Image (cartoon, coloured by chain):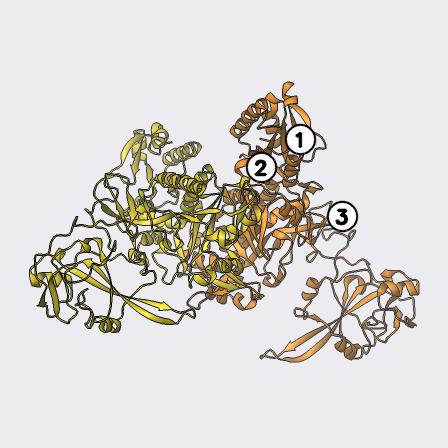
Chain colours: A yellow, B orange
Amino acid sequence: MRASRFFISTLKEAPSDAEIVSHKLMMRAGMIKRLGSGIYTYMPLGLRVIRKVEAIIREEMNKAGGIELLMPLVQPAELWQETGRWDKMGPELLRLKDRHGRDFALQPTSEEVVTDVVRSEIKSYRQLPLNFYHIQTKFRDERRPRFGLMRGREFTMKDAYSFDRDVEGMQASYQTMFDAYVKIFSRFGLKFRAVAADNGAIGGTGSHEFHVIASTGEDALVYCPTSDYAANMEAAEAPALIAARGAATQELTKVSTPKTTKCEDVAKLLGIELSQTVKSIALTVENKDEHGVVSSKENWLLLLRGDHELNEVKVSKVPGLKDFRFASEGEILEAYGSKPGYLGPINTKQPVKIVADRTVANMADFVCGANEEEYHLTGANWGRDVAEPLVADLRNVVEGDASPDGKGVLAIERGIEVGHVFQLGTAYSAAMNCVYLDEKGQPAPMQMGCYGIGVTRILGAAIEQNFDDKGIIWPDAIAPFELVLCPMGYDRSELVKAETDRLYAELQAAGIDVIVDDRGLRPGAMFADWELVGVPHRVVIGERGLKEGNLEYQGRRDAEASAVPAADMVAFVKGKLGK
Amino acid sequence: MRASRFFISTLKEAPSDAEIVSHKLMMRAGMIKRLGSGIYTYMPLGLRVIRKVEAIIREEMNKAGGIELLMPLVQPAELWQETGRWDKMGPELLRLKDRHGRDFALQPTSEEVVTDVVRSEIKSYRQLPLNFYHIQTKFRDERRPRFGLMRGREFTMKDAYSFDRDVEGMQASYQTMFDAYVKIFSRFGLKFRAVAADNGAIGGTGSHEFHVIASTGEDALVYCPTSDYAANMEAAEAPALIAARGAATQELTKVSTPKTTKCEDVAKLLGIELSQTVKSIALTVENKDEHGVVSSKENWLLLLRGDHELNEVKVSKVPGLKDFRFASEGEILEAYGSKPGYLGPINTKQPVKIVADRTVANMADFVCGANEEEYHLTGANWGRDVAEPLVADLRNVVEGDASPDGKGVLAIERGIEVGHVFQLGTAYSAAMNCVYLDEKGQPAPMQMGCYGIGVTRILGAAIEQNFDDKGIIWPDAIAPFELVLCPMGYDRSELVKAETDRLYAELQAAGIDVIVDDRGLRPGAMFADWELVGVPHRVVIGERGLKEGNLEYQGRRDAEASAVPAADMVAFVKGKLGK
């Protein structure tokens, strides 16, 4: 490619609405252009990266037995009504009507359509397993789109759907996709981690997220450096930090704690360790009759050690707490007889169901609220002062917790979710009557899996992981160009022009994706453009060097350029690119 | 590709709603699957063809200096309001609201968005010319979607937009695109014709349509076999078929023509040639005041020779007739004093503006209606019986008409429009203030062109041109596979399996897009599938032939197979494919 025939448009400053580094750099490098909130035109440079990402995904999906098709963006409501998602999905599902008033959705994913295709095409166990995928535009009407391609409304996703005869088959298909994802993210040249994920509302038997590691990532990833344990924060199991409960040694004592509502302040006031305090979190569960009217309410109290954080996904898995909400101040006053900040499990005004985190359940002589404003209790003990609680894992793990596999201690790093594999089971096939006839001619619902990669999100994540103060640093495999040739005086020096043209032709013949900057910019502006754009390899062709037979090579992460004999440059670059 | 790892699903019968052959065959071959009215899933076989079509378009667009980007499908109403198309476009433009109630359109084309990109990116004449294109999903909410991919609602289009400093530049960009289109359609391997088209409402200076030739085509293409003149029916200029008007030889005579309203019947009744009769077509033009209320009406009468057909596009170009409509029966009675079927230019009840087609203007002693029920006039003559009319080209050309370039006579064939190139001028750039600064620093609107190819429509058009009673016959360049290997007993005969695997590997290594049918079907079912799908080349591997060292080759259009030595087959196939 010649830069004079391409479109490059860089900016000194990012627009003010760009909050994170990847968004800022993509805007400054002219890779994307905002059309509306969460809607971007992929400019020529950005599109080149997208195409490379798509090509790698496509190759590995095909190798793993995936079959590509293309399902429409505009999908009839009827299919979404069959699975109930038409009602279940909120305003994120963009709905529209055609000229005849019929309802449609812009697809956020394609479970319904692919299941519709398969139920009409597949009759027999002999036709299974099957894995259909497409790389298609998606739309999610996010309440607050932001971060550029990271949380857009219109975006590109690869979504694959496997169909199997039984659970074992589904698990095999899932493993095949998991392995393909490892290859895909490895080929991107990104540091990534696959973590076990919570299966959410769908249930099923397994789910993993693939995260690009980045200190700016929204998600906390939990892993064990000495084993292969890895999970996201929602799914990482927290151990009890006290092996067994000690005997009570203190009397239950009410102490004055004026204007002291936080565990940290209580510990400081009383001169004790924060780990001796217990935090109380009041919940309400509403029981509803068949008309959806609230018929009764239950009070629940969660207890966490003062230095721990609540994990709401774990709470929702406690039997009875699926639809919990935090209690209002009025409800708290009514149930506990005290304002928040002084709650505890002892002497509640109304009956309260108490759930203690595993660690709290093993504490003795602990400090908690007295259910009386400006008072706490010290020396509280299970069994003696209050009935034994329900026990559950309620907290986020912290660094240093024992790994659930017993093979070390946990560490935490930040990540950006770019892929998700999911064992769906029969959630969709049963709702849509997607069945096959087994060996005995009996109908059985297919076992499904679904597998997504956020194609356009990869760009943002790659940049969050790879940038410096000059701009983006693309990995070779997904860079818009692998190499840029920067001639010093292409339009002035015959020598430079001839060498540039020779090298350009040879590099192209060697299968290297090269751009030559023939725009006639000053060297400073030229270098700044390509450092901002993030092309990973650069060769400068200058008269002075050429007179000694040399060119200058500089990798995007290199502090300095190095002289390379002009005759060796193609081989040198091929070596750098591993070609 | 191995068929066992691919998805092939053929049908004996086409669904009943498939009206034309390409729709029927695509459904039967399992290339597309209906999701809703005018909305199709592109199944794996269909998608392969689409990808090949796209790849050829992309290569030639890039060679011609086009720069690829990708503009969003969901586009804010504000841009469409700037050009007025938000109001001008009818229900074909699918509109929707996001969760905040903001208006958007699903793009049917992208003039507004590309002009918005360019007006914010381009400042100087130095940055022009520029040609941006994308290959993107489009949506048009057709009133009556039908014919499969031929008139769908969701479809894929390549649309390109050129931006130039002046008209000369625009014309050069236009010519470059025209030439690229010729290369693209040639590479598809389709018989096609580029015809001059009417510029429609936009005006501008030039427009051509690219049609795939097919006897089932909706459009009539006019061309001169002995010159390069070609136009669509709307744009093809019709000559006067009488060089000069003869002298009047008959008296004007009123003759009784009971229940005879059509020219054919009048000619038969009077025993004269149809070419001596004149057909009268009554129009109404409404003049409206500034509030859009009709303030007055004009009567217009068009006169065509009895054997000619009206061309409405030509009518709308007659000064004063831009917004014509056909007169109602009530309006006709009022203006002419007679029912339709007996109208004519002589003795109208009210004043009528008369426009004669070029041929009619040179007729003498002609027959026309008497403006009295059941009577016609014979021996009518211009000047003597009625004032000289306005003269215009009003009719469709017919085969044998003189070519407007004077280099022969016209022929007519049928075509399917698959591409359109258009000189837009400043229609969009002026409305959207898309300007550049010229050499003197003065702002000037850019001169634009737009260039579309209906990617998915190509599939339908290619089939309408290339099929037989067995199925589709794809041209090599866009076939889903170039070659199918049909082993006779892949799972039974070691000899067949070994030779099939060897040949498959060698063909792949030779860069041939080959599929091997390892599904274990009976020969008849296997051959029928591939003839229906339309793979253009087939090699059969059988034990009997192999014992003599032979394989069987058959081209999709060949009546019979021919034996080819197994050792020569790769070279033979390469020869057939011109590789």
Per the image, the residue denoted by label 3 is: B408
Q: Is residue A578 visible?
A: yes
Is residue A332 found left or right of B250 in the rendered image? left
**Among the two numbered marks 1 and 2 on one chain, the one whose residue lies closer to the N terminus:** 2
Image height of B458 relative to B392, above or below: above
Per the image, the residue denoted by label 2 is: B481
Which label sits on residue A460?
Answer: none
Say what amino acid the circle numbered 3 marks.
Gly
Which label sits on residue B554?
Answer: 1
Q: Residue at x 70, y 62 (%)?
A: B314
Image height of B334 relative to A445, above or below: below
Looking at the image, which is closer to me, B223 or B507? Answer: B507
How far from the left and from the top, in percent, is residue B327?
A: 73, 73
Q: Residue at x 86, y 61 (%)?
A: B274
State the count of labels: 3
Measure the alpha-carbon separation of dots 3 and 1: 42 Å
Is residue B265 found left or right of A505 in the rendered image? right
Looking at the image, which is closer to me, A272 or B424? Answer: A272
